[in-house]
Image: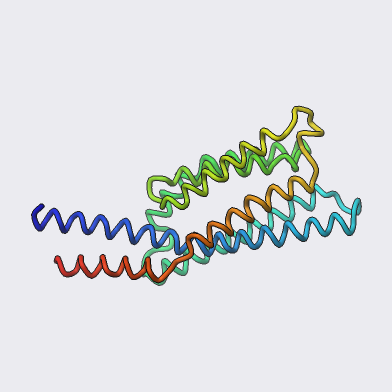
Amino acid sequence: MNRTEAEDHLRVIRSLMEKATIYRALSAPTALVGGLASVVVGGLLFARWRLFPGTVSGRAWFLVGWGAVLLVTALANTFFLWRDARRRGDPFISNGMRHALLAMAPAISCGALLSIFFIRWDCQLALPPIWMLCYGVALLATRGFAPCSIQRLGWAFLIAGFVALLGRSEGRAEWTGGQTAANLEMVATFGLFHLIYAACTWPRKSSEATAATAASADVRLR
């Protein structure tokens, strides 16, 4: 291998390491916020239904609570992306973000459209498996530019969605399940899965030091 080929290989390695570090640095805090919000909202909904049964529709509270989790997580992710783009001097809506949004758009659109139809059919409590499946497919759609950790998270949601869907019976009343069961599914996946992901991928100094070493070696070769 000559000097030019070595430089090219090193630049590719450095680029991949930096992208993996950036994805983990951005996704881990967002996963932590989403996981904590899911656990808190799930606990509040369970307490609300236990302490004040029958006062307000449990299905309405279910939609409001988990809609709030989605809003908080989306706002947190937007803030983390904006802060990182500002720190690096890059535009907020970069080419990478556009590619990611386009890759995830089909699955997210399907989830939103199915949610509308299920709500119109008064089957809100049947939505958790649909949300798991669509979210898992959306994460897997980023496999071309996301680290393996996000792909594992996508497979976890996809498998959990299949299991939850197969656990429903054919009858409409039974298929929708109880509000406590639906709430527990959301906490176990969107809460627990995201907390585990955040704990496993939280940025560590060793990763940053490795990336810095690769960058220094690249500069020396130049």
Above or below 180: residue 82: below
> In the image shown, does 217 or 99 lie closer to the viewer?
217
Quarter occupied by the C terminus: bottom left
Q: Tell me, what colour scheme is on the image?
A: rainbow
Q: Determine the residue located farthest toward the left in the rendered image.
A: 2
In-image side of 98 versus 47 (left or right): left
**Residue at screen point 79% across, 31% down:** 172
**Residue at screen point 26% across, 65% down:** 214
Q: Determine the residue located farthest toward the top in the rendered image.
A: 170
**Residue at screen point 51% across, 62% down:** 28
**Residue 24: percent from left, percent from top:** 44, 60
> In the image shown, does 95 or 131 lie closer to the viewer?
131
Q: How many marks?
A: 0
In-image side of 19 versus 25 (left or right): left
**Residue at screen point 40% across, 71% down:** 205
Above or below 211: residue 135: above
Report which quarter residue 110 is drawn in.
top right
**Residue 158: percent from left, percent from top:** 56, 41
**Residue 90: percent from left, percent from top:** 37, 65
Above or below 54: residue 88: below
In-image side of 209 versus 55 (left or right): left
